Amino acid sequence: MSGREPAAFASLYYTDCLPGQGLGGGAGFGFQARSEGAGEDEQRLVQRGALYEVPVRWMRDRRPVADFPPSLAHLHDGTSHDRTYVTAGGRYLGREANGYRDGNQFTHAVVTRKAGSYGLVRPAQLWGASWWVSTPAPTTSCAPVPAHPDPGPWDTETVRERIAAAPDGRERLLTLVTALGALQGGADRRRVLLVTDRGDDAACWLAAATLLLDRERALAISFKIFATDPDRSPHDVVVAHPDWAGPYRRQDGYLVLDLLDGAPPEIAPPEIAQPKIAPSAEALFWVPLFLGADDPLDVVDAVEVAGQLAREGRPDGRAVAGEVEREAAALTVGLPLGVDPGAAARIAGWLRTAGPGAVDVLGAPLIGTLVAQTRDHRALLDLDHVAARRAAAPGAAELGWDAVAAAARRRLFDREADLAADGGPVPDTPLRPVPGEPFSADALGHVAALERVTQWADPAAALVLAHRHALAVPDGVARRFVGWWADHPDADVDPDGWAAGPTVVADLHRELERRLGEPDLRERTAADVDRHWWRRPDPLAGRIPVLGALGRLDLAVARAAVAAGGEPARAALAALAAAVEPGPNGRWVSTWERLLGREPVDTATVRRFLEATPPRAHDRALAVVAYHSLIRAPAVDEDARAALDVLEKAGLPPRALGHQDWPPADASVTEVVERLEQGARLDEARDLGLLLAKAARPTRADRNRLVRAVRGAGPSVGGRVLVAAGPSTLRDTMLTQLYAWAAGDADHAPDARSVALLFVFAAKETAVRPRVGAGHLKRLQPGHGTLGADGRRAVADLLADDREWAPDDGILELWQEGRKPGASSASPSWRDRVGRRKKG
């Protein structure tokens, strides 16, 4: 036998044997014959529940042998992966072979370890099969039974006809399928008792119900037709004759179904009240299809497919098909599902996560059918994903998956084009590639769909759709999109990942260049570039010239970047300077004139231009251009002073270029300097500091004059002026210069006067702004040791002389207590001493 041929059934015969007739050799009941493959384990399983049961009372009543009904039993042992199945037919023979007593019977049992041996029939359909043996074999060896045995009178078509014609047939079958399905549940399972006087009737109903369970589940249900003592029977379903079923019909341990003519279809004995069991979803799905299908074998095939789908990925093999598996299986064999529009969507969603095994069970034709039958977008997405994934596997083309994947992709495109044309959102995630030639919009007739989306809805949706489906963008669609995009700079469009992205972005830049040259569009377009286009979708500051030759867009981008300042301004001006043709005044003046023209500009523009250009650009020619705007400004504001700082750092102050009276000196700074130089008193220090706080940003020359005046005023006055002035850029600049003098350099010794002034400032600042003052004291601490003895003495002398101006506030003592070189690291710092003085 090849590995693909189903396994035959081994046979066992059991009866009353004459001496030497049976396998045991002795006389009496035992196994008379067996075929290859039937051993002691199989014999024990047959004896456990497959032998014919003789109704003792009938035997004692000496009823005719013909009155005794035949039997049919089915059972198994083990798990789903290691089961031995036994199906046995038996009949009553009457007198024993070894004497004159009644009670002899003959049982023919067939045994297999392969569920596939049963083929398409269920064990109950073997009732009355012509191949059952009812007489002993000539020897102790008997023939096996071929696999896929022929059924008896209850083939599938006949079973369906009988059930459909029976009174309350539908309700009875719903009840029985529900009951058998519940047998494979948990602790609530209840055995089923069928009451009838006709074994063929019981076999028909059991056949119908088990045909609506997949083979694995059907073979797992054990039954016995007939059992004389149901309580002692190990079977899930027991059929009892009315003559001996009475006591058991009154027990609530059974679900009782009375098959006698005229009995109600409920699972409930007529003698006691039991709640009616509602039909299961499984029964409600399969029973109407079975009774109404043109070919009931199609329904049986669908049941089997549903079982395979349910068991896919489950090693225990006991999974029960759910709604979606049943629907998918029914569609696979071509059964109608009515008008339920949600079936395709449910199946598609389930398939996406079911795995390749379930997809292979259903096959490409079903996926193609679902694709053709649904317009649900979510379902089409799922089906496209399933088909594209499966089509990428080796050998998929031979199974038709490439054609199904292409059809699913076309169907999905059509649906998404309709949704986009109606204003719906279009996903922007690219779809999984479909094997075969790349799609062409022209070849598939999708140009019209893309143009329709462009005309009826947001033109961006057409490009998103083309990108998602890997379609080339038609020229007309691209042009319409670019025009729309230029009109809608704030649209949520991100072409970075599109295949057509670089092309449409370049087209957008050309469109902006054109619009900047149109009188009626120039102002609005320039505003859009300034607000948006210069940095989105691509930062353009460093890409000048954007279109290869310096144009209107480049100047608009550079103006926007300079207005933004920082790195974009530097990048834009560097790129613009590299692109301009230098004139007689040099490249940077030419850049200025190309960008800003020759008329004066505001001080903010001058400042941003100068701050964004490198130091090498700050030559005399550029300074002349800058001062041309600065001196004509209505006021010397913060931007003008910042621009002036840049020029002064380049050694190009106003006076060097002939501007003797510009900028006018700051009145506040002038007054503070004059009063300090005239010898301001200690009680004036606070007012001078407050006046200094009102000063605008002075020129570099004024700042130098101011810091020298503060230093020359003495430590107490100068320090208090700085404290009263409060934190500001001007004060920070002055302090930086004082610290530089205090530290000295290679050519200059540390300046004791600057140290004394800073020490007074730090001590007094601690009382007003403790954290700031403490920071300055910490900064001065190392200098106390590096000044040397002469330097420390000079600072002390200055502080001592200052007592004539200042009250005795302990600053001199604080300086003299400073940590000496080599002092212990545990010595308290100035910050600690100042803190103790404040607390004291």
Image: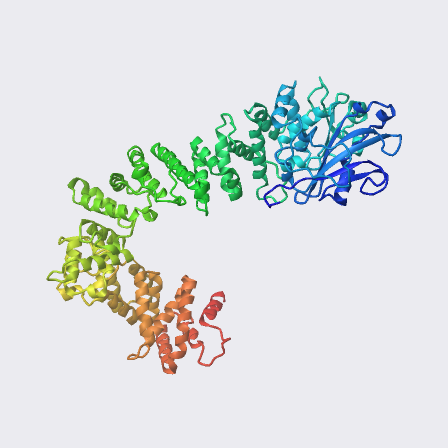
Residue 408 position, x and y percent, is: 41, 37
Q: How many numbered marks does the figure carry?
A: 0
Q: Along the horizontal axis of the image, is 83 left or right of 512?
A: right
* Viewer-nearest residue: 85 or 745: 85
Q: Give the residue at x 47% y 66%.
A: 838
Where residue 480 sits: x, y (%)? 25, 38
- The residue at the point 39 percent across, 66 percent down is 764
Relative to 499, residue 776 above or below: below
* Front one among 821 and 371: 371
Residue in front for this viewpoint, 814 or 62 = 62
**Residue extending furthest toward the right:** 100
Query: Where, by quadrant of the figure, is residue 374 drawn?
Result: top left
Q: Quadrant of residue 407?
A: top left
Residue 264 position by quadrant: top right
Asked which colour scheme the image uses, the reply is rainbow
Residue in view at x 36 percent, y 42 percent? 469
Image coords of residue 11 (percent x, y) = 72, 39
Q: Residue furthest left?
A: 584
Vertical order, 49 against 504 (above or below): above
Quadrant occupied by the N terminus: top right
Res. 683 visible in picture: no
Residue 284 can be seen in this image: yes
Question: Compared to 819, does 126 lie above or below?
Answer: above
Residue 702 at what x, y percent from top left? 23, 65
User: Which of the pair 278/617 is nearer the observer?
Assistant: 278
